[in-house]
């Protein structure tokens, strides 16, 4: 008996040990598996020296494909047909970025619980209830409906799967080993999900709930005064005064004002400033070469692996270079021998909430046009690691899904959703954005550019264009709903058909300009047009300062070179500070300041208004203006249970400069009567005191870079896998719109000409593997504001000296 | 682990040997394999993983990996040996 017990103990102990060390507990990886040098993370340590030639046999290809990797591990794919070029793009992208592609699409599809267990359940429900999968399925119908895009999508998918199937467990990307899951087969739906996620990042912000609360609390007059439909200062994307050469459709009539809202307990996320971008193109008249130069820097959350993947695609009729989104075929931003193109976000009002009147609590019928209309139910099955599947029922109206009947308590991003409201969102539409990039990649001239844009739905972008024929153009492009003015500024009544989207703005009537007299076009997310444009796109856009600075610089620029444009992309001069700072300094009372505060005031007077890395003035101004805005608005606009938003930066500056006696400067929570001067002084002292508390006595530690702490974190925030803090300048309202971990995710400058010259960099590396020397190798060049030359090769033998590895894929 | 258990279960001479032999065998094997992978990588990944665990030097991951591997092998070997003893002991009694 004793021996029996002993024998069982001898079996149980190793089994227990094996189980405990090979199982994932909480955030801890399965340790033994992870640390095992034969299967674990050590296997992901890539050799620093690269093999010069490699050969692969892949059944999915039709003919032989040559892939040349240059000295930054950027693939240049040479294929003999369209199928092979997208197949190889899928294969090579997966080779470098498989985990990222998988993780991003699982995130989009609300499938993180499958990997990390119950803790992601609210996030998964949110993604599904917002209709991400529903929208992706609709998009997919559009993509599969066109033979070109479906062939592209299928070839790309097959390429990714060919790579996935070639992997042994030891070869899985590192993060699979950390999070303990396995790659699954890629599907075309995942490509659609990825594009939906871009819409979620760029076109999911909405303020109608705040605005509705503000309207209820302050009434229409104050609301209109503090939240005007056009900014006080603007420098629109399509130059003011541009004539519209079309006959507009009749604008729909608004219904009577709807104010019976039940929006208590609602708060919303405001589209964070910084998620924006710059692009511009200058005509040959302003350049040294006589050919146009085009520049683009999209501002997004900075992560490792980077959101972008550089690639050159070469096949008959196609030779394009640029950045692609891992998970989508083709090139998103780039150039070919004839044209160059880039994008910035439009921020159109393409997301609306409709208050729904249900017949009863079964939610089977709702009121519309004085009749009861049936809802439909969509069942979302959520797999949860270590638990039973959950089936979530989402009710759909003709507007779209009713996102919440009861809101989750612990999900900040769901704060934005009004309960019992249906969501109408452009990303739910059938669409086929892939064709836009298919045609841009192959584009030769302005006509090709215009044709490509007609295929695009969302997220709406300002597409900038330049060609070797010396044409430049910009178009605020996307599928824009035909709305009455301000439709969607507030929550809409879902029972009234007049509140529905009434069709679409014809795509050839989207705001556009070609070869304007000023010889340049530009955008920085500001208003698309002046007030003369006949249609409503949105009532509010990003503040004008970045765009204004770009236009100021381009206006005076002559004989421009790639270098002058590169320097401009890292320009950190603040128009916001130029407009506001003199008025603030004039109101500070030096007699009331202590020594530190006096020194800070002295520095402010000398500050050149550049958000340079070593500028103390930038730190003080940034915090000072933020505190001042808080002092002005917080007493009126922060009320428990009635979440609202502050008036815009533009309106606040206008108030400070033009109406210093305004009643809004009084703090309603104190018996005393405060004025602007009181607030300016309070905010200044508060700023200096808090900087001193955090960074010590005024000096180099107050430098802007040290206060800002820019860094590039890992996509899943795994410690040790992100970048170190980067001591660099730039600020949200400047061209170099760089905040803590958001900013220029790709900087590109293209000089068109007989042979185009491309320059570009993103803060990361081509490989998504933290064990690769190409994981973060471009960060320092990016941080220094420099660009690499981009090699648009004409054949596999071109620029041979830059090529470090050659891969041949044959059948 | 299974190998260590089985080997020591079959040929393990004494308890001590069954504990230390697999320990050193696996420590050596794992350390060698880890070095074979990490040295041509200039220890880029080992350093990142060390940072992830809050450690500063790459060789900490080498040390932890091989010691953990060795530890598990040792316990398995030891248990394998005693399992045989127990089973044989039982047989002797019968």
Image: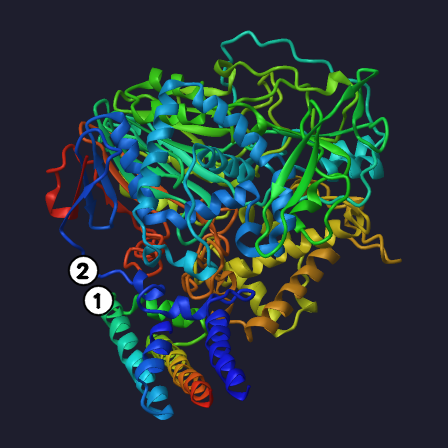
- Residues behind callouts 1 and 2 on a single chain: no
* Distance (Cα) linking label 1 and label 2: 8 Å
In which quadrant of the rendered view does residue A522 lie?
top left
Q: Is residue B94 visible?
A: yes
Q: What number is the disc on residue B40?
A: 1
**Closer to the camera in the image, B89 or A615:** B89
Q: Residue furthest front?
A: B94
- Percent x, y of residue A249: 60, 9
SS at mark 2?
A: loop
- Percent x, y of residue A1: 55, 86
Please name the residue shown 32% across and 82% down the image.
Answer: B22
In which quadrant of the rendered view does residue A569 lie?
top left
SS at mark 1?
A: loop
Q: Residues within 10 Å of mark 2 (few under 14, many from 20)?
A: few
Name the quarter where the C terminus of chain A is drawn.
top left
- Percent x, y of residue A521: 41, 28
- Percent x, y of residue A559: 27, 34
Q: Are marks 1 and 2 in contact (CB under 8 Å)?
A: yes
């Amino acid at each position: 008996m004793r021996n029996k017990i002993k024998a069982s103990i001898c079996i149980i102990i190793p089994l227990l040990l094996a189980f405990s060390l090979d199982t994932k507990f909480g955030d801890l990886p399965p340790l033994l598996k992870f640390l095992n040098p034969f299967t674990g993370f050590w296997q992901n340590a890539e050799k620093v020296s690269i093999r010069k030639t490699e050969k692969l046999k892949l059944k999915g290809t039709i003919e032989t494909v040559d892939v040349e990797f240059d000295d930054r591990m950027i693939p240049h794919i040479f294929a003999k047909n369209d199928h092979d070029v997208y197949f190889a793009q899928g294969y090579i992208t997966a080779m470098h970025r498989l985990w990222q592609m998988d993780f991003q699409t699982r995130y989009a599809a609300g499938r993180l619980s499958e990997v990390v267990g119950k803790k992601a359940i609210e996030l998964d429900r949110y993604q599904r209830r917002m209709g991400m999968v529903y929208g992706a399925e609709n998009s997919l119908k559009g993509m599969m409906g066109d033979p070109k895009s479906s062939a592209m999508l299928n070839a790309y998918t097959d390429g990714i799967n060919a790579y996935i199937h070639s992997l042994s467990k030891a070869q899985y990307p590192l993060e699979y080993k950390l999070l303990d899951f396995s790659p699954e087969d890629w599907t075309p739906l995942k490509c659609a999900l990825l594009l939906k996620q871009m819409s979620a990042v760029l076109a999911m912000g909405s303020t109608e709930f705040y605005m509705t609360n503000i309207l209820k609390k302050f009434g229409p007059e104050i609301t209109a005064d503090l939240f005007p439909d056009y900014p006080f200062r603007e420098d629109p994307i399509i130059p003011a005064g541009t004539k519209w050469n079309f006959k507009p459709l009749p604008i729909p009539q608004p219904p009577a004002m709807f104010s019976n809202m039940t929006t208590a307990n609602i708060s919303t996320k405001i589209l964070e400033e910084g998620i924006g971008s710059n692009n511009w193109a200058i005509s040959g008249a302003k350049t040294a070469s006589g050919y146009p130069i085009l520049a683009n820097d999209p501002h997004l959350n900075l992560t490792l692996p980077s959101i972008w993947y550089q690639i050159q695609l070469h096949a008959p009729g196609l030779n394009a270079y640029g950045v692609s989104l891992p998970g989508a075929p083709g090139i998103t931003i780039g150039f070919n021998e004839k044209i160059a193109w880039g994008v910035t976000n439009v921020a159109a009002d393409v997301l609306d909430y409709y208050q729904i009147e249900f017949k009863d609590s079964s939610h089977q019928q709702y009121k519309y046009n004085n009749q009861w209309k049936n809802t439909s139910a969509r069942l979302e099955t959520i797999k949860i690691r270590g638990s039973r599947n959950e089936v979530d029922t989402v009710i759909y109206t003709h507007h779209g899904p009713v996102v919440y009947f009861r809101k989750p308590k612990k999900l900040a991003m769901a704060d934005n959703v009004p309960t019992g409201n249906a969501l109408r969102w452009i990303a739910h539409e059938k669409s086929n954005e892939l064709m836009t990039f298919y045609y841009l990649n192959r584009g030769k001239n302005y006509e090709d550019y215009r044709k490509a844009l007609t295929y695009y739905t969302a997220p709406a972008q300002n597409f900038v264009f330049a060609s070797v024929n010396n044409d430049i153009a910009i178009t605020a492009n996307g599928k824009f709903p035909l709305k009455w003015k301000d439709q969607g500024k507030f929550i809409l009544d879902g029972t009234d058909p007049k509140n529905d989207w009434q069709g679409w703005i014809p795509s050839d009537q989207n705001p556009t300009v070609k070869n304007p007299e000023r010889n340049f076009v530009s955008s920085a997310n500001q208003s698309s047009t002046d007030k003369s444009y006949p249609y409503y796109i949105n009532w509010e856009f990003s503040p004008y300062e970045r765009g204004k600075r770009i236009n100021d610089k381009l206006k005076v620029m002559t004989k421009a070179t790639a270098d002058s444009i590169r320097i401009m992309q890292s320009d950190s001069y603040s128009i916001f500070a130029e407009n506001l700072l003199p008025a603030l300094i004039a109101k500070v009372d030096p007699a009331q300041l202590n020594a530190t505060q006096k020194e800070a005031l002295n520095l402010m007077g000398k500050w050149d208004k550049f958000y340079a890395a070593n500028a103390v003035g930038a730190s003080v101004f940034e915090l000072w203006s933020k505190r001042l805005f808080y002092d002005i608005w917080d007493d009126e606009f922060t009320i428990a249970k009635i979440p609202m938003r502050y008036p815009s930066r533009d309106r606040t500056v206008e108030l400070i400069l033009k109406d210093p006696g305004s009643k809004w400067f009084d703090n309603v929570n104190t018996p005393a009567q405060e004025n602007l001067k009181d607030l300016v002084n309070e905010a200044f002292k508060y700023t200096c005191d808090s900087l001193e508390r955090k960074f010590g006595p005024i000096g180099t530690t107050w430098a802007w870079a040290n206060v800002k702490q820019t860094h590039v974190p890992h996509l899943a925030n795994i410690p040790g896998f992100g970048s170190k803090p980067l001591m660099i300048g730039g600020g949200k309202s400047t061209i170099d719109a760089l905040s803590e971990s958001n900013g220029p995710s790709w900087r590109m400058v293209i000089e068109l000409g007989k042979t185009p010259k491309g320059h570009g960099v993103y803060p990361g590396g081509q490989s998504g593997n933290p064990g690769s020397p190409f994981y973060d190798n471009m960060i320092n060049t990016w941080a220094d504001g420099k660009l690499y030359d981009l090699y648009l090769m004409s054949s596999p033998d071109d620029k041979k000296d830059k090529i470090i590895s050659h891969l041949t894929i044959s059948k | 682990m299974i190998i260590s258990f089985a080997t020591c279960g079959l040929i393990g001479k004494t308890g001590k040997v069954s504990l230390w032999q697999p320990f050193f065998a696996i420590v050596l094997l794992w350390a060698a394999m880890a070095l074979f992978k990490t040295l041509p990588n200039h220890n880029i990944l080992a350093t990142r993983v060390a940072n992830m665990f809050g450690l500063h030097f790459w060789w900490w991951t080498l040390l932890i990996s091989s010691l953990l591997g060795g530890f598990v092998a040792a316990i398995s070997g030891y248990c394998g040996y005693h399992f045989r003893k127990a089973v044989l002991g039982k047989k002797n009694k019968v």
